[in-house]
Image (tube, grey):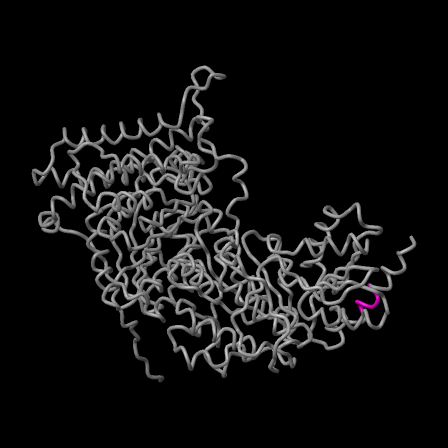
């Protein structure tokens, strides 16, 4: 018979509940503060549902009524410098953090509502209604609430999407020498989401002060927890990653407070992440003012049982038992909270003159429509005064890939905020291609971070670092196709963050990756990501065809306050090239394309390794072409002056790229050119691309799928044939 040994995870998993003694020992000021916050949040949520019922809330109104105990209990003891973020049902968490911030964690339940508390209620309501006075200027609404000053990092409409960002915030807290912590709130459904589980693993591996707080309200929309997992004790997730975990009654704010204090002590001592599961109950349906029983997935008896455990009733009862408050005092507190919300509503809503008995949002409070695109990215004013790559002077020979490593080493030496992270970037003498050569040896493991294979987690962590502002992350995706694994963090989170939260937050992040067409790695490793990123908001894009340009473009990317995709190419890595002697600090700012050669017959526009193929094709055909190396590819950074001047001269355009038709960058660019310069075009914009299919492993089929010199020759000949048409 085989020998069997029962294994243990080695970390605590604790079921936590309070006793009468805990309530008797509790600080009366703490209990009063919790009761006041609970009533303020309840009155706020009731008002939101009332306005939603009148059609004044545009979009969903995910009420937290019934779940307030988990938020108040876990947040009331936090510092303003501690961070929290959450999911789409996050009004209660945001309000608890904002109220704790403006009151220094203490509210007298018998005192009038103060002006700072009233301002929080007012601005939060305005944000949910989409008004300019909101914390995010109306862009965030109900699901995207952020106030950095209070440590409210931003709620999130993507289930589980905030976990990597919270982990990044915790990394910044730890490595800035603080004892601050971050709490990431999510529901029972997100406990199975890959980004959450990846973040738990990364937080544990790197010993980060982040708590994964599971608000287990037993249902997704209408799907019960027992339908989605074999073990509905969701805090069991921590055991698989070696994370100590607490399971607590979320309808008992004091129990949540005490459990969170234990977890906070663990995190502040440097012992790493925690998991807290609070079992709570939303009294209403997923969205709107009706109970779940109205939709048939819950019974009225179940709802009545949970209503009897209302955290507002519990705290009031325990305080009355100790003689700390009377029933009349509790009723007065509720009235003051409701009056505060009546006043808040009166500041934003008025009678609708066109509909008797109806109300409307005050028209003057809507954001100006001209604000619609403001803050998609920054204005790049941080690069004012930079002229571009140096001309003339001595140069030294270097391989392209060595220039990649050398400029990064220079910037890291000059700017201690820069951290590099990705798979194997710290090993193999510079990763799989040598692009980070020497960095780990010089700067150490706290600035060159080899990550698990978890693009969602480490890319999102970098996003959290960038939003925090104390660090400037540089992420390496080993291959660009891996962006699909991390698509939520890349596009929904990092790319949209500045705009979504009001337009002011810098997101200084660089994402490096390499195109590997021609290397035989097949359909899932070789794509050109330019077309995907160019049609996604928020990202800037650079693609250097030579080492000199790479230095200047990377310096610009690392100075910008926006997320920047830096595309490299394996064909260029080994290329012998030249860079200026003694100068790795020059900058090539947005709006600076390179005119590689001048001609009069056609404007050829390309980037990256296809610049060389275009040069060869022009020489072979003898066509007199302007050749423009874009260098900057995104909508905000492209050099329309150089492109326009060339088109007005040649009256014909050929866009050249290597990759597949479906994800083509040239499709977007051709449309822009056609609309901008139609009057100067003598023929339609022509394009050279690869085939519809992604490149295959077969050497023959791979070559057939991509564009190289021969395809550019054919494209030039087709343009020439159309000169007289």
Specify the quadrant of the image occupied by residue 164: bottom left
The residue nearer to you, when weighing 443 against 248, is: 443
Outermost residue on the front side: it is: 393
Seen at 22% across and 31% down, the residue is 334
**Residue pictured at 70% horizontal, 69% vertical:** 695
Q: Toward the viewer: 368 or 593? A: 593
Provide the residue span drawn in magenta. 711-715
Image spot of residue 612 (x, y percent): 73, 72
Query: Measured along the vertical axis of the image, is residue 261 above or below residue 117?
Result: below
Residue occupying image coordinates x 59% and y 60%: 541
Residue with the most extreme right position: 724
Whole-percent x, y for residue 14 in the image: 23, 61
Task: State the predominant SS element of the stretch in magenta.
Answer: helix
**Drawn side of residue 516 relative to residue 653, left or right:** left
Q: In the figure, is residue 276 to the left or right of 133?
A: left
In percent of width and height, residue 301 lies at 31, 37
Q: Is residue 668 magenta?
A: no
Does residue 549 appear anywhere in the picture? yes
> Along the horizontal axis of the image, is 486 left or right of 230?
right
Kindly give the residue lying farthest to the top in the view shown.
356
Q: In the image, is residue 712 part of the stretch drawn in magenta?
A: yes
Q: Is residue 17 left or right of residue 492?
A: left
Q: Can you say whether 93 is above or below 573 in the image?
A: above
**How many labels sit on residues?**
0
Relative vertical location of residue 326 with respect to residue 526 in this rendering, above or below: above
Q: Where is the N terminus found, in terms of image quarters?
A: bottom left
In this view, the residue in front, 291 or 673, is: 673
**Residue 187 shows in this picture:** no
Q: Considering depth in this image, is 10 or 389 the residue closer to the camera?
A: 389
Residue 388, picture quadrant: bottom right
């Amino acid at each position: 018979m085989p020998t069997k040994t029962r294994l243990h995870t080695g970390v605590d998993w604790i079921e936590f509940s309070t006793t009468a003694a805990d309530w008797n020992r509790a600080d009366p000021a703490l209990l009063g503060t919790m009761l006041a916050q609970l009533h303020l949040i309840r009155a706020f949520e009731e008002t939101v549902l009332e306005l939603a019922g009148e059609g004044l809330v545009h979009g969903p109104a995910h009420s937290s009524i019934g779940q307030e105990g988990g938020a108040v209990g876990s947040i009331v003891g936090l510092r303003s410098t501690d961070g929290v973020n959450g999911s789409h049902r996050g009004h209660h968490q945001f309000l608890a953090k904002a109220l704790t911030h403006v009151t220094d964690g203490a509210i007298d339940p018998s005192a009038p509502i103060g002006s700072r508390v009233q301002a929080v209620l007012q601005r939060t309501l305005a944000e949910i209604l989409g008004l300019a006075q909101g914390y995010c200027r109306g862009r965030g609404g109900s699901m995207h609430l952020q106030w950095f000053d209070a440590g409210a990092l931003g709620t999130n409409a993507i289930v589980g999407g905030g976990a990597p960002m919270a982990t990044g915030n915790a990394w910044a807290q730890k490595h800035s020498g603080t004892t601050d912590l971050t709490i990431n709130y999510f529901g029972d459904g997100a406990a199975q989401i890959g980004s959450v589980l990846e973040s738990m693993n990364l937080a544990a591996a790197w010993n980060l002060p982040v708590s994964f707080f599971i608000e287990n309200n037993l249902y997704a929309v209408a799907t019960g927890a027992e339908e989605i997992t074999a073990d509905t004790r969701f805090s069991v997730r921590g055991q698989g990653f070696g994370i100590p975990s607490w399971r607590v009654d979320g309808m008992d704010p004091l129990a949540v407070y005490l459990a969170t204090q234990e977890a906070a002590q663990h995190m502040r001592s440097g012992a790493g992440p925690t998991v807290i599961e609070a079992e709570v109950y939303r009294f209403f349906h997923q969205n709107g003012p009706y109970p779940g029983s109205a939709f048939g997935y819950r019974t009225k008896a179940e709802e009545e049982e949970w209503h009897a455990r209302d955290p507002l009733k519990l705290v009031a009862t325990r305080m009355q038992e100790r003689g700390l408050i009377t029933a009349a005092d509790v009723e007065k507190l509720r009235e003051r909270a409701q009056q505060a919300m009546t006043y808040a509503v009166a500041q934003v809503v008025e009678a609708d003159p066109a509909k008797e008995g109806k109300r409307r949002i005050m028209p003057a409070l809507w954001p100006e429509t001209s604000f619609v695109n403001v803050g998609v990215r920054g204005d790049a004013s941080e690069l004012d005064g930079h002229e571009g790559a140096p001309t003339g002077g001595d140069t030294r020979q270097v391989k392209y890939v060595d220039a990649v490593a050398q400029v990064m080493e220079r910037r890291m030496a000059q700017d201690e905020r820069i951290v590099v992270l990705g798979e194997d970037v710290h090993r193999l003498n510079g990763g799989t291609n040598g692009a980070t050569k020497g960095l780990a040896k010089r700067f150490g493991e706290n600035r060159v971070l080899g990550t698990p294979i978890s693009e969602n987690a480490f890319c999102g962590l970098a996003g959290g670092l960038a939003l925090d502002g104390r660090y400037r992350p540089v992420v390496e995706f080993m291959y660009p196709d891996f962006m699909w694994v991390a698509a939520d963090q890349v596009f929904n989170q990092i790319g949209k963050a500045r705009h979504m939260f009001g337009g002011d937050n810098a997101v200084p992040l660089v994402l490096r990756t390499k195109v590997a067409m021609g290397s035989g790695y097949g359909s899932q490793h070789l794509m050109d990501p330019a077309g995907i990123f160019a049609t996604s908001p928020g990202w800037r894009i650079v693609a250097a065809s030579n080492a000199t340009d790479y230095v200047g473009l990377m310096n610009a990317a690392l100075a910008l306050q926006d997320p920047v995709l830096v595309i490299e190419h394996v064909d260029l890595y080994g290329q012998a090239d030249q860079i200026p002697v003694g100068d790795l600090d020059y900058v090539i700012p947005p709006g600076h394309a390179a005119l590689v050669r001048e001609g009069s017959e056609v404007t050829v526009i390309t980037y990256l390794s296809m610049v060389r193929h275009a040069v060869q094709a022009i020489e072979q055909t003898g066509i007199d072409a302007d050749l423009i190396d874009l260098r900057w590819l995104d909508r905000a950074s492209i050099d329309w002056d150089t492109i326009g001047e060339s088109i007005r001269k040649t009256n014909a355009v050929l866009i050249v790229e290597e990759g597949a038709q479906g994800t083509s960058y040239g499709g977007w660019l051709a449309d822009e050119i056609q609309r901008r310069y139609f009057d100067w075009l003598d023929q339609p914009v022509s394009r050279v691309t690869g085939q519809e299919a992604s490149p295959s492993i077969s050497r023959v089929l791979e070559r057939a799928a991509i564009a190289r010199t021969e395809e550019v020759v054919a494209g030039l000949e087709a343009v020439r044939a159309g000169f007289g048409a």
